[in-house]
Amino acid sequence: MRDTDLINSIDTDAIETAIASAEKNCSGEIRVHVETTIGAHEIRSVGERVFERLGMTKTKDRNGVLIVLAAEEQQFVILGDEGIHAKVGDEFWHHVAQEMTDHFRHGRFTEGIVAAVSEAGERLAKHFPYHRADVDELSNEVSFGSSEEKR
Ligand code: CA
Ligand code: CA
């Protein structure tokens, strides 16, 4: 089954390590969230809801980046808060999404997510460099949920 493929094959330790290492070079916050299934919902609207729910809009510099995946549908969306979005523009997200899609097509879910996390981290580092007083404002843990019951 496709959903168990993505859910079972992603290596949350590898993703959390990638997030921690990206956040060592920037003040931004990166999170990854996996929904089991989004049913008939649009991945973007689900993503925006998760963005709010995880407190992504609460960072001091509004520089949170969230990758939301729908396991069963094998869809994803990458959302940047207004601080980072103002700096990078749409092409950057399209570029990262394209790279993720290439990995996903070959079933390389973890690699795709890790690549997106590192790219987002590099870009965050450019605009929001790490400083000594930096706080880990949002957990690096991959979170899980399901939109199904809200249909
Ligand atoms: Ca931080
Ligand atoms: Ca963090």
Image (cartoon, rainbow, N blue to C red):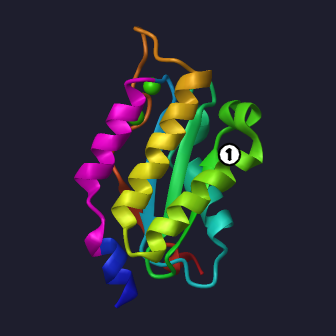
Residue 79 within the magenta-colored segment of the rendering: no
Quadrant of the picture in which ligand 1 is shown: top left
Q: Residue at the spot x=51%, y=61% of the render?
A: 100
Q: Would residue 7 be visible to someone looking at this image?
A: yes
- The quadrant of the image that shows the C terminus is bottom right
- The quadrant of the image that shows the N terminus is bottom left
**Does 15 sit above or below residue 109?**
above
Residue on which the image places disc 1: 92
Q: Residues within 10 Å of mark 1 (few under 14, many from 20)?
A: some
Q: Position of residue 135 (x, y in %)?
A: 41, 20
Q: Residue at the spot x=51%, y=29% of the render?
A: 28
Q: Nearer the viewer, residue 78 or 140?
A: 78
Magenta stretch? 8-25
* Residue furthest top as drawn: 132
**Does 45 sit above or below residue 139?**
below
Residue 93 relative to residue 102: left or right: right
Q: Under tag 1, what secondary structure? A: helix
Q: Position of residue 17 (x, y in %)?
A: 28, 42
State which quadrant residue 19 falls in.
Answer: top left
Q: Amino acid type of disc 1?
A: Phe
Q: Residue at the spot x=71%, y=36% of the render?
A: 88
State which quadrant residue 76 falls in.
Answer: bottom right
Residue 82 relative to residue 21: left or right: right
Label the magenta part by its dominant secondary structure.
helix
